[in-house]
């Protein structure tokens, strides 16, 4: 009887060992799960996840990297267990879907902030334009600010709201600097002299204007 029990237990142990080898030894890497998780993450990145939700995107990227390392470690073993890697990939994919669901709201918030910054920049530009013409000696001119505002609008149309907001802040700061320069007494006096000179030129005959220009060159 003891001999029979010994043989039975031995056979049972061998059977369990063979089943373990079949289950884990023949287990295949979760290639489909990996491809699905990466596809979801790449889609989120294309929609701006790295810009509008950088912390969440970084966590998902780290989870995918950990899953890849886990798969590589299991590939080097004879008895392989890909369950931990599969769980990491499933969570990464679920987190990516949640991120994409919130991405639209985050982009809308960024759009609102950029639009408000753009309005503030345009307001200061209009104030600078009302202050009078900018002198050629100014590093910042009304013309250069107009070009910058055009660039800001292009960024908004491309839905690059973070870059647009930064651009608007710079425009406002430059407009503020120009307004301060234009309100200095030295600039006002130069503007008055320039306007008086232009008025005098208009009152002269063509011959007189030519003579005056030649005298200025001497």
Image (spheres, grey):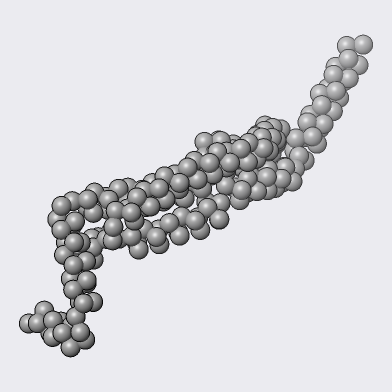
Quadrant of the rendering where the C terminus is positioned: bottom left
What number of labels is visible?
0
- Compared to residue 28, the image places residue 175 above or below, namely below
Query: Horizontally, is 5 left or right of 188 in the view?
Result: right
Q: Quadrant of residue 196?
A: bottom left
Residue drawn where x is 68% and y is 48% of the image: 39
Query: Horizontally, is 133 left or right of 105 in the view?
Result: left
Quadrant of the rendering where the N terminus is positioned: top right
Task: Work out whether residue 129 can be spotted.
Answer: yes
Q: Residue furthest bottom?
A: 207
Residue drawn where x is 13% and y is 81% of the image: 212
- Compared to residue 152, the image places residue 44 above or below, namely above
Residue drawn where x is 79% and y is 34% of the image: 23
Residue 198's x, y, as percent? 22, 72
Query: Horizontally, is 44 left or right of 171 in the view?
Result: right
Looking at the image, which is closer to me, 51 or 3? 51
Q: Quadrant of residue 81?
A: top right
Residue 114's x, y, as percent? 48, 45
């Amino acid at each position: 009887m003891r001999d029979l029990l010994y043989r039975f237990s031995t056979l049972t142990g061998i059977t369990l060992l063979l089943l373990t080898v079949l289950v884990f030894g023949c287990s295949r890497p979760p290639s489909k799960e990996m491809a699905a998780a990466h596809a979801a993450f790449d889609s989120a990145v294309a929609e701006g996840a790295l810009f509008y939700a950088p912390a969440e995107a970084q966590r998902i990227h780290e989870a995918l990297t950990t899953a890849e390392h886990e798969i590589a470690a299991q590939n080097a073993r004879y008895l392989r267990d890909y369950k931990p890697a599969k769980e990491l990939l499933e969570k990464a994919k679920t987190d990516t879907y949640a991120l994409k669901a919130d991405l639209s709201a985050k982009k809308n918030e960024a759009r609102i902030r950029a639009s408000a910054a753009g309005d503030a920049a345009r307001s200061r530009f209009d104030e600078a334009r009302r202050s009078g013409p900018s002198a050629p000696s100014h590093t910042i001119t009304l013309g250069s600010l107009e070009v910058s505002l055009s660039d800001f609008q292009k960024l908004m149309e491309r839905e690059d709201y973070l870059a647009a907001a930064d651009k608007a802040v710079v425009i406002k700061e430059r407009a503020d600097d120009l307004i301060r320069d234009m309100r200095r007494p030295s600039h006002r006096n130069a503007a008055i002299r320039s306007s008086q000179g232009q008025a005098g030129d208009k009152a002269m005959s063509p011959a007189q204007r030519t003579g005056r220009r030649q005298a200025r060159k001497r």
